[in-house]
Amino acid sequence: MEELKQKILVIDDDETLCLVIGEELEQENYSVTCSFCGRDGLDKLKIDNYSLVILDYNMPEMDGYEVLKNIKITYPSLPVIIITGDTGTEMAKKFLEIGANDLVNKPFEFDYLLGRVQKFILNI
């Protein structure tokens, strides 16, 4: 019997980065769905169960802060990793106060992101 893959939703308006993260995570045996805007990402959460969300902060129309607030209202226990180029202490504090589980600075090494993903999915 095949083991069920953990599902990860990646929400980032940078389609190239989103797809690269998705491809790398799939090589690590995760099932990945990419979404290129916040609203679409929230819609995808309504139709499937995910183990983790990787969320970009800086997106047009609905930024990561708004998306995170919506996620935490509806799915309070769903782990969310914020990826951003702006991780100053005020930004980090703002995200952590509304429920982000982790922040990863852009640019990042994939292995670092993978370690953060495994921390929340495998509870290590």
Image (cartoon, rainbow, N blue to C red):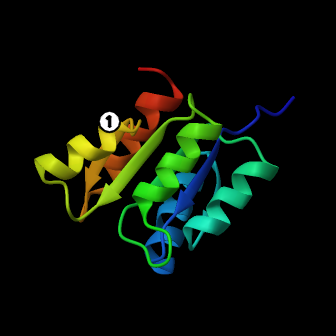
User: On the picture, is 114 further left or further right than 8?
Assistant: left
Q: In which quadrant of the rendered image does the N terminus lie?
A: top right
Q: Residue furthest left?
A: 89
Spot occupied by residue 84 in the image (x, y as percentages of width and height): 29, 61
Asked if 118 appears above or below 29 in the picture, the reply is above
Report the residue marked by disc 1. Answer: 97
**Which of the two residues, 59 or 30, is positioned nearer the viewer here?**
59
Neighbour tally class for label 1: few under 14, some 14-19, many 20 plus, Cα within 10 Å: few
> Quarter-wise, where is residue 94 in the image?
top left
Q: In which quadrant of the rendered image does the C terminus lie?
A: top left
Q: Residue furthest top?
A: 124
Asked if 58 appears above or below 122 in the picture, the reply is below
Q: Residue at x 48, y 49 (%)?
A: 68
Provide the secondary structure element on which disc 1 rests.
helix
Spot occupied by residue 93 in the image (x, y as percentages of width and height): 22, 41
Q: Amino acid at mark 1?
A: Glu
Spot occupied by residue 107 in the image (x, y as percentages of width and height): 23, 65
Q: Residue at x 25, y 63 (%)?
A: 106
Q: Residue at x 56, y 31 (%)?
A: 76
Q: Residue at x 56, y 72 (%)?
A: 37
- How many marks can you see? 1
